[in-house]
Amino acid sequence: MTQPTHDEAHGGALGTRLNWLRAAVLGANDGIVSTAGLVVGVAGATDDRSALLTAGLAGLLAGSLSMAAGEYVSVSTQRDSEKAALAVEKRELREQPEAEFEELVGLLADRGLSRAVAREAAEQLTRRDALRAHARVELGIDPDELANPWHAAWASFLAFTVGALLPLLAIVLPPAGLRLTVTVCCVLGALVLTGWGSARLGAAPPGRAVLRNTAGGALAMAVTYATGSLLDVAGA
């Protein structure tokens, strides 16, 4: 008989994958939508290729650096919190090991183990590495895989840059009469792909993710294009 496949991710693997997914998807989507909104807004006011290129490059650089800095600060705060929690747990294990042991037994029992099995498991985990056992069971932290701010920053920087290149190239490469159409089509197509990909990697239904991505991108481009057109008509 064919064994059933089992594709679920568990524990730290899922947490790590979702962290990378979050940074990559947010970076790519933000790069696509913000740069598309910027260049489409400028296109509403002018069809000058150099103006579009300058605006797109400025948006790409500002956005990618901003995303990287934001992720670095956010994940650094998370890492500091994890390290502080581990330090507290380490001190408690040193000062009151019996109470911490009973706490571990209780946590394991709360997960469905009988009291006897929970106590045996706690004894084995404590002998192997008490701090690691408490970190994983009590805090939900893997001491060997603390959040890495540099990884998150680079992932966001690269994802934003890749996403931003699409609308930038789409607005400057085609002839003037096709720029807007090509850009809108490319952006909406890319948002469909990123929405579908993020949903699939996160084991979620793709419909809502795709709809959110495309609706948000379309709205952003419509608003900025209308604003650019109004400014052009007003002679601003």
Image (spheres, rainbow, N blue to C red):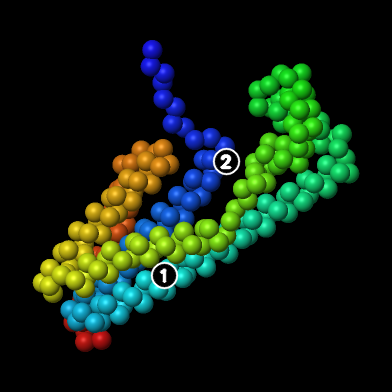
Residue 104 seen: no
Label 1 or label 2, whichever lies nearer to me, is 2
Under mark 2, the amino acid is Gly
Q: Residue at x 89, y 44 (%)?
A: 95
SS class, disc 2: helix
Q: Which mark is residue 155?
A: none
Q: Nearer the viewer, residue 155 or 203?
A: 155
Q: Residue furthest top?
A: 1
From the top left corner, tell me how far across and down residue 34 is, in percent: 35, 66
Give the residue number, with chain letter if any, for mark 2: 12
From the top left corner, tell me how far across and down residue 155 is, in percent: 46, 59
Q: Nearer the viewer, residue 142 or 2?
A: 2
Judged left or right of residue 61, residue 16 is right
Judged left or right of residue 207, residue 6 is right
From the top left corner, tell me how far across and down residue 33 is, in percent: 33, 62
Quadrant into which the C terminus falls: bottom left
Q: Decide which of tag 1 and tag 2 comes sooner along the chain.
A: 2
